[in-house]
Image: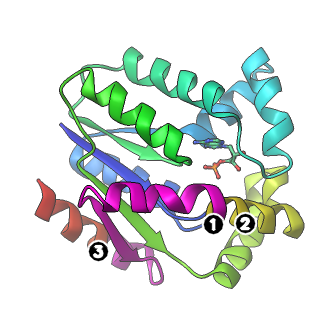
């Protein structure tokens, strides 16, 4: 199996690239952000709980997020691999992912981190907010909080996999096609 973590700050292009990579490598794309938005759209108890965090740009608690991710993986066992997008966002989530994959004698193949500077991120998310309909994309102070949360809680996940020799930085500035080519070059070296 190929189990990729597409990493990087909000607005770094993870969703766009994951959709393309999924097609090329025949993987299942799992975006925890999309899963939460689906639950919120259906006003489920999980969605209601997640909403209070998401609208502030905070992380949804690990126990909720890990449980939801586990359900999604367990519901889709017969795939060639997964692209995790927006997960793991804390070291505890990374440890839980390793346990989950380990139960099937699998492991994370690589973590690819899209590198984009903060000002570019704010610009991109505000632009996306014009059409995404996401309240958390439309308020600059929430966007800046999401970046802060990324730096304090999520960036350590890069180091966690770096210690295992699995993390790679990918230049996230350029055209969608250029960035896709960089990601494919990195992936092709791993498989
Ligand atoms: P995203 O679409 O990946 O930008 O996620 C949108 C929001 O959903 C984030 O700002 C968090 O509030 C929440 N979220 C998504 N994934 C996670 C995760 N792995 N852990 C905690 N919260 C998450």
The stretch of residues the image draws in magenta is 152-180
Residue ID at (56%, 24%): 68
Marks 2,1: beta carbons within 8 A:
yes
Q: Is residue 159 magenta?
A: yes
Q: Which residue is mark 2?
A: 148
Which quadrant does ligand 1 occupy? top right
Q: Which residue is mark 1?
A: 151
Look at the image and tell me whether residue 130 can be seen.
Answer: no
Q: Is residue 147 magenta?
A: no
Disc 1 element: helix
Residue ID at (71%, 37%): 60
Name the quadrant containing residue 182: bottom left
Q: Nearer the viewer, residue 2 or 127?
A: 2
Q: Which residue is mark 3?
A: 182
Name the quadrant containing residue 79: top left
Whole-number angstrom distance, CA of label 2 to CA of label 1: 5 Å
Quarter of the image with the N terminus is top left
Q: Earlier in the sequence, mark 3 or mark 1?
A: 1
């Amino acid at each position: 199996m190929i189990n990729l973590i597409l990493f990087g700050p909000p607005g770094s292009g993870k969703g766009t690239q994951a959709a393309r990579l999924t097609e090329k490598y025949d993987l299942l794309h799992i975006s925890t952000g999309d899963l939460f938005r689906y639950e919120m759209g259906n006003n489920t108890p999980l969605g209601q709980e997640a909403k209070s965090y998401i609208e502030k740009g905070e992380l949804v608690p690990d126990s909720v997020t890990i449980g939801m991710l586990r359900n999604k993986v367990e519901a889709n066992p017969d795939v060639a691999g997964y692209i995790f997008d927006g997960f793991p966002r804390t070291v505890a989530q990374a440890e839980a992912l390793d346990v989950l994959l380990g139960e099937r004698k699998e492991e994370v193949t690589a973590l690819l981190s899209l590198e984009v500077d903060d000002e570019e991120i704010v610009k991109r998310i505000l632009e996306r907010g014009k059409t995404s309909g996401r309240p958390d994309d439309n308020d600059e102070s929430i966007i800046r909080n999401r970046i802060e949360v990324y730096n304090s809680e999520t960036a350590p996940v890069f180091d966690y996999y770096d210690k295992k020799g699995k993390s790679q930085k990918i230049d996230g500035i350029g055209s969608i096609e250029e960035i896709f080519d960089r990601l494919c070059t990195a992936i092709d070296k791993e498989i």
